[in-house]
Amino acid sequence: MGRKVMSFKRTTIPFTEEQLMNIFKSHDADGDGKLSQDEVKKAFKYLGSRWDAYRANQAIHLADADDDGYIEEEELKKLVQYALDCGYTIG
């Protein structure tokens, strides 16, 4: 008799807006209340991005409304929306 092989379908769970908000806030390394390009890059690396530098550049371009090179509290929602659109998942 042949052996039965069990296969499991990998399930992916998308991050919630709140989880992403907390992840990005936790990457504010110097605690100045805004995210630099390097801090955003590290957050995308944490999320599992293979193109963390590209994602950070795109995110800054899309979310930085005052064009100062930082993501501030009032711009964070756009950054989180970009990350949601990218489809990062837990696991």
Image (cartoon, helix red, strand yellow):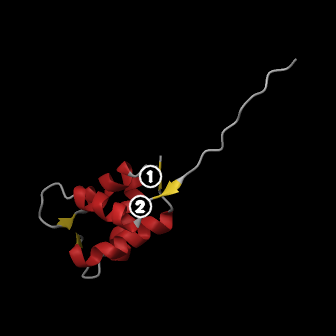
Residue 29, quarter of the rendered image: bottom left
Q: How many labels does the image show?
A: 2
Q: In the rendered image, is residue 60 in sight? A: yes
On the image, numbered disc 2 is attached to which residue? 55
Distance Cα–Cα, label 2 vs label 1: 8 Å
Residue 25, how many percent across, how many down? 24, 62
Residue 38, how many percent across, how many down? 26, 56
Q: Which residue is drawn at 22% across and 63% down?
A: 36
Q: Please state which of residues 71 and 22 is positioned toward the viewer in this rendering.
A: 22
Q: Residue at x 55, y 52 (%)?
A: 12
Q: Residue at x 12, y 60 (%)?
A: 31
Tell me, yes or no, whether the two marked residues, 2 and 1, touch with CB atoms within 8 Å: yes
For this orientation, the residue located farthest to the bottom is 66
Badge 1 crowding class, 10 Å Cα cut-off, few under 14, some 14 to 19, many 20 or more, is some
- Secondary structure of the residue carrying tag 2 is helix
Residue 47, how many percent across, how many down? 40, 52
Against 26, residue 68 (above or below) is below
On the image, numbered disc 1 is attached to which residue? 49
Q: In the rendered image, is residue 68 in sight? A: no
- Secondary structure of the residue carrying tag 1 is loop
Look at the image and tell me in which quarter the N terminus lies: top right
- Please state which amino acid type lies under the numbered disc 2: Arg
Residue 55, how many percent across, how many down? 41, 61
- Please state which amino acid type lies under the numbered disc 1: Ser
As drawn, is 76 to the left or to the right of 29? right
